[in-house]
Amino acid sequence: MAISRRNFLKCAALTAGGAVLAESPFVRAGAKAVIKKDIRYVPSFCEMCFWRCGLIAKVEGDRLVKLDGNPLHPQSRGRLCAKGQSGMGLLYDKDRLKTPLIRTGKRGDGKYRKASWNEAYSYIAEKLTKIRKKYGPESVALFAHGSGGAYMGNFMEAWGSPNHSHPSYAQCLGAREVAFTLTFGQGPASTAERYDMANSRVMALFGSHLGENMHNSHIQDFVDGLGNGTKLIVIDPRYSTAAAKSSMWLPIKPGTDIALILAWINIVIKEHWYDHDYIAKYAIGFDKLKEEVKHYTPEWAAKKTDLPAKQIVEAIRELGRYKPNVLVHPGRHYSWYGDDTQRGRGLAILNALLGTWGRKGGIWLPPKVNLAKLKKKIKYPKPKRDSLAYGDYPFSSAGITTEVRQATISGEPYPIKAWFVIGTNLMKTMPAPEITRKAIDNLDLVVNIDLMPTDMVMMSDVILPAASYLERHDDLAVVTQKNAGIAIRQPVVNPWKDVKPAWLIANELCHKMGLGKYVEYKTLEEHMREKAKLWNISYDKLSKVGYIAIPDSYHPYITEKNQPKFDTDSKKIELYSSALDDEDMDAVPRYTHHREPPAGSFRLIYGRSPVQTFSRSINNKWLWELKNDNEVWLNADIARQMGIKNGDKISLINEKGAKSNVGRVKVTERIRKDCVYLIHGFGSTSKRMTMAYGRGIDDTQMMTHYATDPICGTNGLRVNFVKLLKES
Amino acid sequence: MKHYAMVIDQSRCVGCMACIAACVQENQVPFENFRTRVLEITKGKFPKLRTEFRPELCNHCDNAPCVMACPTGASYKRKDGIVMIDRDKCVGCKACIAACPYDARYINEEHGFADKCTFCLHRLKKDLEPACVATCIGKSRVFGDLSDQDSEVSRLLAENESRVRLKAAGTKPRVFYINRYPTKK
Ligand code: SF4
Ligand code: SF4
Ligand code: SF4
């Protein structure tokens, strides 16, 4: 011990932060122990998740040593979450993709050879050319998440395919945005979540993972609200982190939320707890709504939801009493039972009745931003065939991943023969991974652009290693909190030598395919400078401070002069949706009974950890250290009956016989008896993810079944029932 | 003379662990060791429950058993209240680890000395808050000087009922817990 202590003293000057350096494979030859290091602070914004908080990177020599929040940036306000703090774990991950790879074995068996970029591009070009010849350019599809998606979107446009899809839509927020758009003409999500939680008198959260999904400023607002004495009502079958902060927890029976919402709407109308003037001025369809909901009594809802009628009334009374400075938050990861748009309609109607849209403590109005659009120098070709990614749903408003997957299998309405995947681990994102696998088997080409060898990456033919958010530029970001502003992402360190930023990959692919005329810029930075100039912002200042506010953009609340605009057919808030009526769909939500788990089975519900961004971050050493496993939450009484103890090994098996890998049980009072809960994203099957491989249970694997929303095609993901098998 | 202390408002803690991650990076805490943690403690029976989030770290005790147990004088108490370890004097004997009733210390295996939270003394010297405080998403952790009556820590302790961990142990901790907005159940 004493010897090593002396060793320490000798190198103490260099090791303030030496741990990462010592084990990083990314150390360049020139980066030998430099005693006097120059220290730089570089602002940028985070992409450990998609909240995109402003950060300041502390760089010693050419090594990143610390990440802190940028105080100027309204989404971090000087603070970063655990993920944001641990960005170096991604940057210096020894398992990162370091060079292009081309598959040599069968798909999924993990055999690859190293390739040069040119080889990789040539491989792709050859396949693409064949596909275009035989099936047309539309037979190439894109699955995208994160900043890189936009550039690959440009490539798709240049190539002539309209088939872009986004898991953030069908597997997450889609139905909620559609519901609010049908009601208010606009959704509250964007990146900001326009819920004015810091100023709210009463907040009702439906199944929300607030605090467990760590979206920095959103949580800061939430806690500031608690600090200001907000009354919190949480509706969730599980006693979540948010529930732990509540003054009223409604442990609702899963699948019955619409019953509660309809009863609340009825009570609000009957008791005249709605905002009369607001409704008279801004809404239409009140009488029809009133008529349709009049039978939904608290007693009726109590039977459906397994909540006491008294509690149902008590909760809505609080909202009614403090309206309009209240809010009803639908939560994220919103896709549950296949009638999610209707649930969202119900929540939107409640918000409307309580007058929350545009009110302090409710849902703020978007900031006013009038930024000129950069003139497109190019015109993309018009695809000959319509996108198949929207499916056959009257209100789908973005590409649906599962529709592309289905077409890949069926060849209808036309074949899909190549997938480009960027920033999304489809094997863990889309339900029913066995169907994804089947679709992949039908493809002539699978290309992945990513940082880590995820499950999906290991299914591809060509793997293109991307630069991380800490090594690249991305287009200027317009931040729309209550105040709007412009934020910059720029490299804080040089990229590892053989990885490339997605914008460059997209441009090079264009050139390779003879589509050079559609490439808009030589370097992205040149494009960013041009934009900054157009917007009258000093690019140099921006790159020094990281964020510049747009003056006079703050108009969050309704005033005489600041009137809300509702972009619906009627230009009013539609309590009764004529758009849905026209499609022969319920213009006012109705309650549908969902199947319940048979005896001995549990509904599988899933959620999030504040230190992980799904399967994206699970190999990050510094996050792994905080959370590297997911336990199955099981109700304590049930556990006792089953003879299961906390920490026991189990596996899950679903109704179709799909069996999970072995994990552990968390025996807890914090969940109802009819469901079990898992944090999403664990159970990596990729051996190249050496920290994460095989750890925890993959909830997606248990989702062989999903319920499609007839309105917008999103996937309800809380419809699988599982049994627990004891393991030793 | 300064009298450093931390006040943790548990009603504002959401168990997000940003504090832990910040501490690990700021202080280059060796892999799988921690200077701070956040406990999640649930009491009650469904549906009458209460879950408490409790961040823990070295208490910088005024009556510090680790300091008393240290045979070499490596562990010492500064005048401003911070309990520190002189790495030069530490022989890694673990007496302090055994003496600390709060499980706040670990051995830096690579270099063989005991280590723990320093209240981020190196940052205080630069007029910066401790890393865990600076990034706390819930603004649950508040740091300051108790000898200054106008400091936020003084004010919080004056206005709220506070607790310390294991009061009966008589260690006189300088990390105080409050719960400003008790949730009614
Ligand atoms: S919430 Fe955390 S991970 Fe997401 S962008 Fe902000 S700091 Fe990064
Ligand atoms: S004060 Fe500094 S050393 Fe102590 S727990 Fe906080 S970050 Fe870690
Ligand atoms: S950062 Fe703050 S809110 Fe998050 S766990 Fe730590 S003390 Fe609690």
Image (spheres, coloured by chain):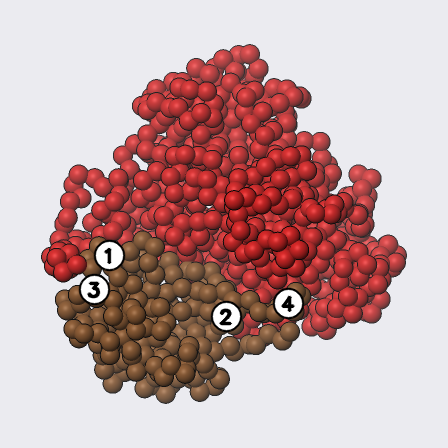
The residue that disc 1 covers is B109
Give amino acid for label 1.
Glu
Discs 2/4, front? 4
In this rendered view, identify the residue nearer to me: B142 or A293. B142
Give percent across and percent down for residue A717: 64, 43
Does any portion of residue A712 appear in the rendered image?
no
Amino acid on which disc 3 is placed:
Gly
Determine whether the beta carbon of the residue marked 2 sits less than 8 angstroms from the nearest atom of ligand 3. Answer: yes
Q: Quadrant of the N terminus of chain A?
A: bottom left
How crowded pointer 3 is (Cα within 10 Å; few <14, some 14-19, many 20+) is rated as many
- Left or right of residue A294: residue A145: left
Q: Nearer the viewer, residue B72 or A242?
A: B72
**Residue A531 pos. (x, y %):** 41, 44
Separation of marks 1 and 4 at Cα, in angstroms = 42 Å
**Residue at image coords 61%, 57%:** A208
Distance of label 3 from label 1 (alpha carbons)? 9 Å
Q: Spatial distance from mark 3 to mark 2, Cα to Cα?
A: 37 Å
Work out whether residue B132 can be spotted: yes
To the question of a shared chain for discs 1 and 4, the answer is yes
Give the vertical position of A420 relative to A595 (above or below).
above
